[in-house]
Amino acid sequence: MAEKNRYSDAELQEFKELIQFKLETAKEDYELLKSTITQSESNDTQDTSPTFKVLEEGASTLSKEEAGRLATRQAKFIQHLQGALIRIENKTYGICRETGVLITKERLRAVPHATLCIEAKSRQ
């Protein structure tokens, strides 16, 4: 039997549904992180005594910096998922960009935006 060079339309549809679910979740998480960064109605340093104000301001700044890093990472993940949807539409999804062989279904289920097979990834 000849080796498959791309996934079938039914298989691509299965991956598309998985990616769309992950994309929705990722967008919700991104919005939550953004609101954490910009939220002004929280119990911030405005209602604390001066003794603890400096400590809370520092903790608040660190928390917002961490949320900013997470939001940036989440935005990048969303872009990768959107790229995977484009590859599904082009019927090139699941093909390793270095070797040209199919990426295993197990890998794509775990990392649906993967563009490298395990062998190519391990060589990096």
Image: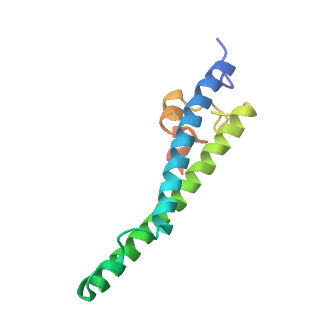
Q: Identify the image quadrant of residue 14.
A: top right
Q: Position of residue 68 (x, y in %)?
A: 49, 66
Direction from residue 104 to residue 7 in the image, left or right:
right
Q: Determine the residue positioned at 73% across, 33% down.
A: 89
Q: Is residue 70 above or below residue 27?
A: below
Direction from residue 35 to residue 101 in the image, left or right:
right
Q: Is residue 7 above or below residue 28?
A: above
- Colour convention: rainbow
Q: Position of residue 84 (x, y in %)?
A: 64, 40
Residue situated in front as seen by the camera: 54 or 83:
54
Q: Position of residue 18 (x, y in %)?
A: 55, 32
Residue situated in front as seen by the camera: 78 or 90:
78
Residue placed furthest toward the bottom: 50
Residue situated in front as seen by the camera: 54 or 11:
54
Residue situated in front as seen by the camera: 32 or 15:
32
Q: Determine the residue positioned at 58% across, 32% down.
A: 103
What is the total number of numbered labels drawn onto the structure image? Answer: 0
